Image: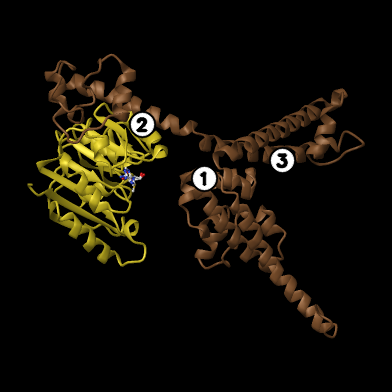
Chain colours: A yellow, B brown
Amino acid sequence: MSDLPAGVERHTFDGEERLATRGPPAYGEPTDGEWRAWDTGRSKVGAMLDRGLDTGLAADATVLYLGAAAGTTVSHVADMAGPTYAVEFAPRPARDLLDVAAERPNLFPLLKDAREPGTYAHAVEPVDVLVQDVATRGQADVALRNRRFLRDDGRLLLSVKARSEDVVAPPDEVFDRALATLREGYEVLATERLAPTHDDHLAVVAAPLSE
Amino acid sequence: MDGIDSSDRGWFEGIDRDDDEAATQAIRDGTADATADWPARAVESGFAADEGDYYDILHDATMAATRAAVQEYERSDDRQLQHSIRAMDDCERVANELAERVAEWAGTLVDDGGTGVGFCRDLADRDPAPAERRVVELARRVRDLDDEAAELRAGIERTAPEVAPNLSALAGPVLAARLVALAGGLETLARKPSGTVQVLGAEEALFAHLRGRAPSPKHGVIYTHEAVRNTHPDDRGSAARALAGKLSIAARADHYTGERRPELDEQLRERIATIRARRDDEAAEGAGSGAGGDGA
Ligand SMILES: C[S@@+](CC[C@H](N)C(=O)[O-])C[C@H]1O[C@@H](n2cnc3c(N)ncnc32)[C@H](O)[C@@H]1O
């Protein structure tokens, strides 16, 4: 069980203790002074921190976030971490991501396809934490392709959605297959099912294997 | 700069830090094989004064690049088509609602009352007595909304065949636009299985069915298509399935190649004719045996 990183605290909102970061509100979440609640039901990284997983996220960490969508989670990550690169390939959510990034000078939005890291390697520096939440087929493969961004002592925080890989196969089977692929380039440090808030998802913390 | 492969360059290399357009383009179109410590390189090369300065420029450049890409997408023809069809529906719906209000109100003031948008158009042309001023003005708004709906429809009939030539040929431009809008784009429509295309627009009925409260819907908006509407009610499920199948193929052809495939029109016509003929045959048989076998 790991302590919360600096910049993430537990605050009480409407009588309920929840994770929070300091920054401009982004999606109608409740606030307490400068602090805003991190909805762990909508954010897998939030759920991972809440459960005490050692994520490697820290105040000075550089982060590459794949699958940023409208920016719900990445807004909190940018609040507490260092330079944060947010990759999303769908224009519609990217429009909302722009609003979130406009208020955060350390958040860099990129409308790119995570399957093609060469299209953003010219802008993204080596990072301490690679977060991936793309909910698309071939999630482990995307993580392998993006390993090049991760520093040797960096961490991959991967969320695998079973239904994105295979709608009929039992999730456990899908997760096993994904982990087998992932081990081609990573050492898996921890895995955790995020039920009930994120049924159907497996959270993985991994470290890059040295080449 | 010889010796440095362009694929190993940071986005900022070779551009002027004050040239926003070049920066936007570099972020959007640049590539590199490998990452590098770009902030340090940018400072070393003199592009940025220090890391903080670099991040400020990077923030502006990534914001501008992403905004430009999002805007391009918003302005694309299939997005415009989606807005047009929704606006047309809104104009028609509001015109009809207002027309009801006008009819009710006018009924209290004029002897020759009436109903609907048509009545509003007549009323709008009148020179109103002082007491009728407001209701006649309202009728004019209905007429204007109705005119705007017609303009929008004309625009859709012009652009849908450009955006989706096969889909428009099979479904008609307005239904084609409606399907694109319901799917959220031509690309998403092209990716949907035909079973989903069949029930697009019937989501409520579909969810009720999935919750076990209703039979599965046989068709969504495609029921407005002649192939479904003019088929015997018992065969509409089959007709809808056949139609959805061809529409899916059409959407894929439109998205992936954009080439017109006239054979699809013929195939659809044949499929529907076969479905209808089955019933005619049965009817003929039924009638034949009843009449004592003078069939043929
Ligand atoms: C489950 S959502 C992410 C939610 C987000 N991480 C959060 O917690 O706020 C998955 C996102 O990944 C995006 N995505 C899927 N495939 C992608 C790809 N190849 N490259 C970039 N983004 C992708 C989708 O468009 C979608 O917005």
The chain letter for the residue carrying disc 2 is: A
Residue B223 at x, y percent in the picture? 65, 56
> Mark 1 or mark 3: which is in front?
1
Which of the two residues, A138 or A158, is positioned nearer the viewer here?
A138
Q: Secondary structure at mark 3?
A: helix
Q: Is residue B199 left or right of residue B34?
A: right
> Mark 2 or mark 1: which is in front?
1
Q: Residue at x 23, y 26 (%)?
A: B11
Q: Residue at x 13, y 51 (%)?
A: A186
User: Is label 1 on the same chain as label 3?
Assistant: yes
Q: CA distance from mark 2 to mark 3?
A: 38 Å
When the figure is inspected, residue A18 is found, relative to residue B127, above or below; the finding is below
Label 1, residues with CA under 10 Å away: few <14, some 14-19, many ≥20 = many
What residue did someone put label 3 on? B97
What residue did someone put label 1 on? B254
The chain letter for the residue carrying disc 1 is: B
The chain letter for the residue carrying disc 3 is: B
What residue did someone put label 2 on? A98
Q: Secondary structure at mark 1?
A: helix
Q: Quadrant of residue A31?
A: top left
Tag 1: amino acid: Asp
